[in-house]
Image (spheres, rainbow, N blue to C red):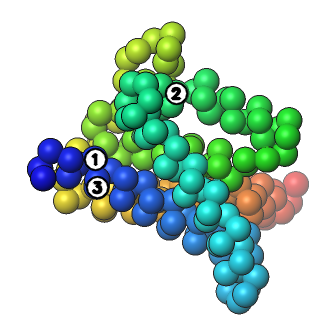
Amino acid sequence: MRGYLPLLMNKEGHVLNAVLLSIGLGYILEPAGDETTFLKILEVGAPVVLGALFPDVDTAFGKHRKTLHNLPVLVGFIAFWLHFENLAWVWLGILTHYVLDVAGSKRGIALFYPVWKKEFGLPIGVTVSSERATMATALVTVAELALIALLVYRVPLSAVDMARQSVGL
Ligand SMILES: [Zn+2]
């Protein structure tokens, strides 16, 4: 029981992250809070959750936190998205999985695999079995949504404009 508990919690963490992220995205992209918001959450949520589950497939095929946890995989999915105009939300799910593994756990991931097998993580991470893992997951999700909201609403640009106007430029 104890043996697979951390892995189980890890999966739950990634699903929780993907679901919260999708709900936030739904409100950022369709802020009305009605049926259109709900449909956007559904549209975004399914592929983001699938993408967030994908990297840990390397527990079965390949080396965990290496084979499907690296930048070449991420770049490959961007190329797929740009070329076929498909899998954009799956790509975001994979990205958020990486972010959570790097920021939300101590172990980190092999970002430059297969060239460099070193696993990169942040010292602020908590071990996945810790009860603080859920809190870490929530914090990472909030940070991601804040960043996405900044990108979508272009807050930095309007802030620059406001500063410019206030000094009369
Ligand atoms: Zn992972």
Residue on which disc 3 sits: 9
Mark 2 crowdedness (10 Å alpha carbons): few <14, some 14-19, many ≥20: many
Up the image or down, 91 lies above or below 60; here it is below
Residue on which disc 1 sits: 7
- Residue found at x 65% / y 44%: 91
C-alpha distance separating marks 1 and 2: 19 Å
Q: Secondary structure at mark 1?
A: helix
Q: Secondary structure at mark 2?
A: loop
Q: Which is nearer the N-term, disc 2 or disc 3?
A: 3
C-alpha distance separating marks 3 and 1: 5 Å
Q: Position of residue 6 (x, y in %)?
A: 23, 48
Which numbered tag is attached to residue 70? Answer: 2
Q: Which is nearer the N-term, disc 1 or disc 2?
A: 1
C-alpha distance separating marks 2 and 3: 22 Å
Q: Position of residue 69 (x, y in %)?
A: 48, 31
Asked whether disc 3 touches disc 1, contact meaning CB atoms under 8 Å apart, the reply is yes
- Quick check: is the Cβ at mark 2 less than 8 Å away from ligand 1? no
Mark 3 crowdedness (10 Å alpha carbons): few <14, some 14-19, many ≥20: some
Up the image or down, 72 lies above or below 160; here it is above
Asked whether disc 2 touches disc 3, contact meaning CB atoms under 8 Å apart, the reply is no
- Quick check: is the Cβ at mark 3 less than 8 Å away from ligand 1? no
Asked whether disc 1 touches disc 2, contact meaning CB atoms under 8 Å apart, the reply is no
In this view of the protein, which residue sits in the foreground, 127 or 148?
A: 127
